[in-house]
Amino acid sequence: MFYSVIPVVSCALMLGIGAYEDLKKREIDDWVWFIATAGFGTNLYLLEKHSLLITPLQWAIEVVVLSALGISLYYLQLFGGADAKALFAIALALPSALPPFSSQIPFFGLTIFDNAVVISVLYSFSLFLSNICKALLSPNYFGRYSRSSFFTKLGLAFSSYKTTLGKYIKESYKLFPSEIPKLSEGKVVLTPILKRMTIDATELEEKYANLLKQGLLNENDEIWVSPGIPLVTFMFLGYVLTPLFGDLIFRLVSVIVLHI
């Protein structure tokens, strides 16, 4: 029982601290991932003692699958470096669901990832509902995008919200502009960013700051920004939810299949 607690606690600490730093500064110090070594060391000891809590094949598959998933999503620019490191650390520290955690699939790291994906979707949907409610209350809510295509407005509604340029500059460490500024005939024209990962956030922040200094924009001008998806935070929430629900995607699919 004692040895099953160490991987569980080390993962909770790692993801909890990672979530705090993710929300606080949107960057996670590398030392956080080394907390998983407590669980990793315990797993090696359990293997040596031939414990039934862990099997070499299951652990190896978990590490390979989660590492491949993290690296693939990172190079596809769907993941940040911290997100990929978190998956790898989870695979090393907690390859199977130990009490009080549960999972309907044999790989616990995938359960945490699945839960994080579900929470991410709910988070985006909450942004969408907020924007739709504001648009219903204010017919000109989409402003310069009022005549844009349905898909442009839909993309903004699911990923972004409106704020002032001044607020963005103050909170640029955790916000990413959804619009890129361009000069046209001495005026600033803002256009939506279609491929976010191809844009350097620091460079874009400097562009806005320079336009502000030049007086071409002012602090009260409204821009669309994205709060981003703090995936490590969602992994932590997904981890906490597993004792209650297990794998959320598996559970949702099961409910759908049963009602077909």
Image: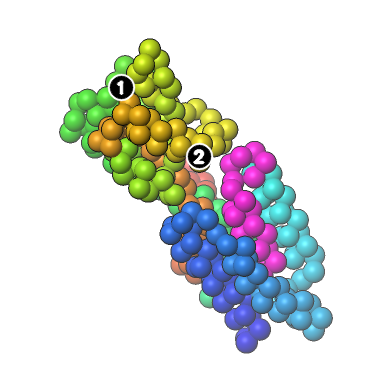
160 to 194, vertically: above or below:
below
- Give the image location of residue 168, x and y in percent: 35, 42
- Give the image location of residue 12, x and y in percent: 54, 71
Mark sitting on residue 201: 2
Magenta stretch mostly in which secondary structure? Answer: helix
Q: Does the magenta-highlighted stretch encompass residue 72? A: no
Q: Is residue 60 left or right of residue 179?
A: right
Q: Magenta span covers which residues?
A: 74-96
164 to 5, vertically: above or below:
above
Q: Is residue 50 visible?
A: no
Coloration of the structure image = rainbow
Place residue 212 in its image quadrant.
top left
Instruction: Please count the marks in the image.
Output: 2
Place residue 158 in its image quadrant.
top left
The amino acid type of the residue labelled 2 equals Ala
Q: Is residue 248 left or right of residue 34?
A: left
Camera-side residue: 194 or 243?
194
Task: Residue at 72% x, 50% y: name it.
Answer: 68
Q: Does the magenta-highlighted stretch encompass residue 86? A: yes
